Amino acid sequence: MTGASHAGVAVVGALGRMGECVREALSGHDRLELAGALEAPGHPGLGRELEAGVAVTDDAQRAFEKARVAIDFSLPDSTLANLRVAAKAGVAYVTGTTGFDDAQREEIAALAQQTPVLHAPNFSLAVNLLVRLTAEAARALGHGVAAEIVELHHAQKRDAPSGTALRLAEAIAEGRDQNLADHLVLERAGDVGPRPDGAIGVQTLRGGDNPGEHTVMFIGDGERIELTHRSQTRDHFARGAVQAAAWILGREARLYSIDEVQGS
Ligand code: NAD
């Protein structure tokens, strides 16, 4: 239950891989505590009591009742539906869900006029450094050096390529002053011909239980630079999301970025 000195947090996707890590990261936190647990309708864990007074529910209003902020790792449709409820209730919203389409991104930005919202495709401090290093390398190397991204994730991951790979592609486009949509190459099969100048290629690998690896390659004639980040656990993502939830409390309603939280 929410104590006087702690702000309540509702975890959306509370029984998922990330939801479990977020609940772990909240336990013993000095400012935040679990106050609600939301899961998908029909989930076998509905009704399970996770802590005294916090049972898993599929009713967003109930899950958000005692919460000041929600931390969500679920699915794009779930994030949108639950963010609409949070916006009405004035509950701040931190989401790490990936795989949104353009219309969903626009709706998230619109709902951020009503309640503070932070969306990050990756909450790792090191990955966000990788994003900045990638933009810097792309700026320095220019269009003449081919940029390719390879990502590897566990076999259960639903969206491809990963939100982080797309963020890295965006960083390359930013560094080279390009429009990403004009240069992104997500597939190569058949008679694809020579590599177009300025292309930004992204390849997706899936298998096993890997929490996520990303390599950015800058491939020139006779030389190559590779920048790689490897996750061995999900704990650092969860800690980053919990840090963002503590940071966003009391802020004005708008869309925030992870760079603002991590002070970069
Ligand atoms: P998961 O499938 O293990 O967990 C998702 C949970 O959401 C499930 O328990 C599911 O039942 C629940 N859910 C589905 N619909 C729901 C609804 N309407 N309301 C409430 N809960 C609902 O997946 P995961 O590995 O935990 O990943 C979840 C998301 O987080 C993915 O989009 C993934 O790419 C992303 N992710 C982001 C980061 C990051 O740092 N931003 C890190 C890891 C994963």
Image: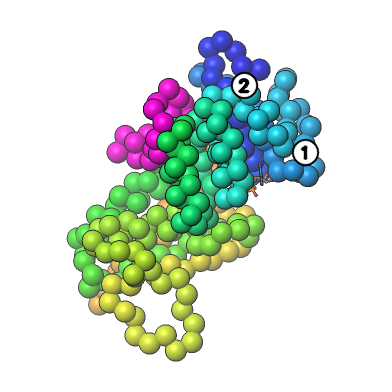
Label 2 and label 1: CA atoms lie apart by 20 Å
Pinpoint residue 205: horizontal percent, then vertical percent: 54, 66
Q: What secondary structure is found at the residue carrying circle 2?
A: loop
Position of 192 relative to 85 (above/below): below
Residue behind label 1 places its C-beta within 8 angstroms of ligand 1: no
In this rendering, position of residue 249 left or right of residue 52: left
261 within the magenta span: yes
Return the mark for residue 45: 1
Task: Look at label 1 and name its amino acid.
Answer: Gly
Query: The C terminus appears in which quarter of the rendering?
Result: top left
Range covered by the magenta-colored residues: 240-264
Return the mark for residue 94: none
- Foreground pick, 226 / 179: 179
Query: The N terminus appears in which quarter of the rendering?
Result: top right
Pinpoint residue 142: horizontal percent, then vertical percent: 21, 66
Question: Mark 1 or mark 2, which is nearer the start of the sequence?
Answer: 1
**Which residue is found at the position 44% from the left and 42% from the top?**
110
In this rendering, position of residue 145 left or right of residue 155: left
Pinpoint residue 249: horizontal percent, then vertical percent: 45, 24
Task: Look at label 2 and name its amino acid.
Answer: Lys
